[in-house]
Image (cartoon, rainbow, N blue to C red):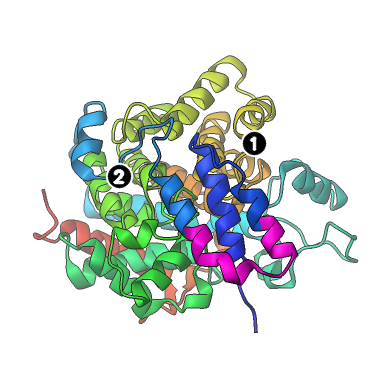
Amino acid sequence: MLIQQNLFPENLQLAEIMRLNESGIDTGDIKNRIEEAIQTGIFSQFEETFWRELEDLSRKPSCYYEPSDWETIQQLKPSSSPVKEIHLDEETLFDHIYGAWLGRCAGCVLGKPVENWHREKIEAYLNSVNAYPLTSYIPQRTPFLEGLHLHPCHLVATLGNIHFMPRDDDIDYTILGLHILETYGKDFTSDQVALATINNLPFNLVYTAEAIAYRNLINGLLPPKTASFHNPYQEWIGAQIRADVWGYTNPGNPPQAAEWAYRDALYTHTGIGIYGEMWAAACIAAAFVEGDPQKIILAGLNEIPRENRLTQAIIDTLNWLEKLNDWRGVWELIQSKYGHYHPIHIIPNTCFIVMGPITGEGNFEKSICNTVMAGGDTDCTGATVGSIIGAICGSKNLPEKWIAPLNDRVKSLILNFQDVKISDLAKQTVKIINSDEYKR
């Protein structure tokens, strides 16, 4: 039986200490006491005592003001990006929506084999198969090289072995968002997001913050409490990977995309974890009416508070890109300032998402490849960048070598969407956009 070890109580508590420290909260000697209890085999006797101490610590003033309630977020953000009407005929609108779906799938498949690898390990592997710098899907290496082998479950995402978009949580959540809109309409609630999740996704195939929120819901908690109770992953990337469909269904309307993303994120995340999804949804909405990656990124920033760790990281990355415009040099600066965060944390991964399209100059291949070669949660970051550039380009302008292997087919866990055409997902998205219920 496969068990997610990061859900073990002792690992959750050590992760919570890391989260508190990253928030500027002094946790004293509790880490040493937990580790000693683990080593001496008495942790279970003191588990609840440690949780109470950690909860008390979490109520201490943080160095950062990163509220999670909608009203305060609205007060702290800049002026929203202007809503731009989409002046596209239905065929052209479909082409750009389809491009976004295809781009997400391609970027996800590209990053899947090296998920959570560090940049140096990715480079070493790619050099071992004569594929550095990356210009295609990642080749499988045979024979295996110790320390540089791909997990067997990822071989379906390697060059020559791709015949569809394989099931992946990054795509499950995008499809789930479509299901939520079709089931509950544009006024869906965070409670309905939670219900749709547990009705469609088995517990052992959701991870980190989503797994904790899922467990909290089953134990009787409701959003937003599901996001914060014993959840050290509430600032990781999990909410951001669910952002895309809110951008797809609000083309040209970043404020509304961000608001829908907020309702989705509230079930599993707090603070900058929420902002990460709002920002990405707004960026994708803007990408349907704006072709400049930097302006798209700024449109996303208009929808989240001005002063917080995520906003600062995005601004830092933009400033470094202006000076260097070299992804390797910018990566070094990102690593220097933000490398202490976990590889699945929202901050470094968002930096890589910002870096890809700008150093790629809007070119689909360069954008997703530069993002994935940076490391971190590569299937997530590659997918988000794929959505942005795919929305800009449209399906007809995406390179055939990236799109043809997908065969217009995606697999998922979502009821009635287990094996569907990607083009059908795009058609359903356009249908939602054109529905009288959803029109502004």
Q: Nearer the viewer, residue 36 or 240?
A: 36
> Magenta stretch: dominant SS?
helix
The answer to whether the residues at label 1 and label 2 have Cβ atoms under 8 Å apart is no
Give the numbered dot on residue 190. Answer: none
- Residue 34 appears anywhere in the view: yes
Find numbered disc 2 in the image and state the secondary structure of the residue it sits on.
loop
Please name the residue that numbered disc 2 is placed on.
68
- Residue 400 appears anywhere in the view: no
Q: Residue furthest bottom?
A: 1
Please name the residue that numbered disc 1 is placed on.
339
- The magenta stretch is 35-51
Give coordinates of residue 76: x percent, y percent: 25, 30
- The crowd level at tag 1 (other Cα within 10 Å; few <14, some 14-19, many 20+) is some
Q: Is residue 42 left or right of residue 170?
A: right
Q: Nearer the viewer, mark 1 or mark 2?
A: 2
Q: CA distance from mark 1 to mark 2?
A: 25 Å
Q: Residue at x 20, y 56 (%)?
A: 433
